[in-house]
Image (cartoon, grey):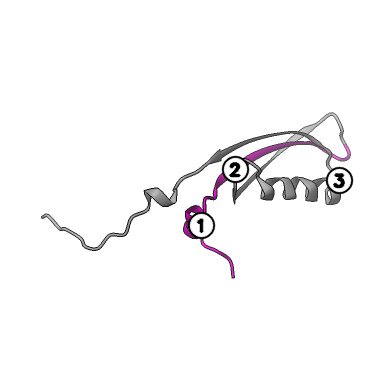
Amino acid sequence: MQETPTELMLKGYGLTTAEIFYRMPDYRNVLNTFLWQEYDLAPDHPRLFKFVEFWQDEIEGPLHSIRFTHRKMLSSGEWRQVVGEFHYH
């Protein structure tokens, strides 16, 4: 069963966004970009590196460079249970 983004964030995952520059297979002088986004663990980024290995093994366009950023949007210390709601009209 797939975990929800909230469950992943509570486990320490953050949103990793990678901009991948690669060469076109038939036109080596042309660079193209691909945007990849996934919840991943910093600083090792196992999901990003697994995707890069997949790219190198399965996709014909050779990689030129990769730029990525990581944003940890929620940590367990920031999460709190709400036990009630207060309405003010």
Q: Which residue: 68% across, 46% down?
A: 48
Q: Amino acid at mark 1?
A: Pro
Q: Is residue 17 left or right of residue 57?
A: left
Residue 22 placement (x, y as % from top left):
78, 37
How many neighbours does mark 3 have within 10 angstroms: few (below 14), some (14-19), or many (20 or more)? Answer: few
Residue for badge 1 = 5
Q: Amino acid at mark 2?
A: Ala
C-alpha distance separating marks 3 and 1: 31 Å
Residue 80 placement (x, y as % from top left):
33, 55
Residue 23 placement (x, y as % from top left):
81, 35
Q: Determine whether label 2 and label 1 are within 8 Å by CB.
A: no
Q: Determine whether label 3 and label 1 are within 8 Å by CB.
A: no
Q: Is residue 53 left or right of residue 34?
A: right
Q: For the residue labelled by badge 1, is the local secondary structure a helix, a strand or a loop?
A: helix
C-alpha distance separating marks 2 and 1: 16 Å
Q: Amino acid at mark 3?
A: Glu
Residue for badge 2 = 42
Image mark for residue 84: none
C-alpha distance separating marks 3 and 2: 28 Å
Residue for badge 3 = 60
- Please check the rendered image and state whether residue 23 is part of the magenta-colored stretch, yes or no: yes
Region in magenta: 1-26
Question: Which image quarter holds the N terminus?
Answer: bottom right
Mark 3 or mark 2, whichever is nearer to me = 2
Q: Nearer the viewer, residue 2 or 33?
A: 2
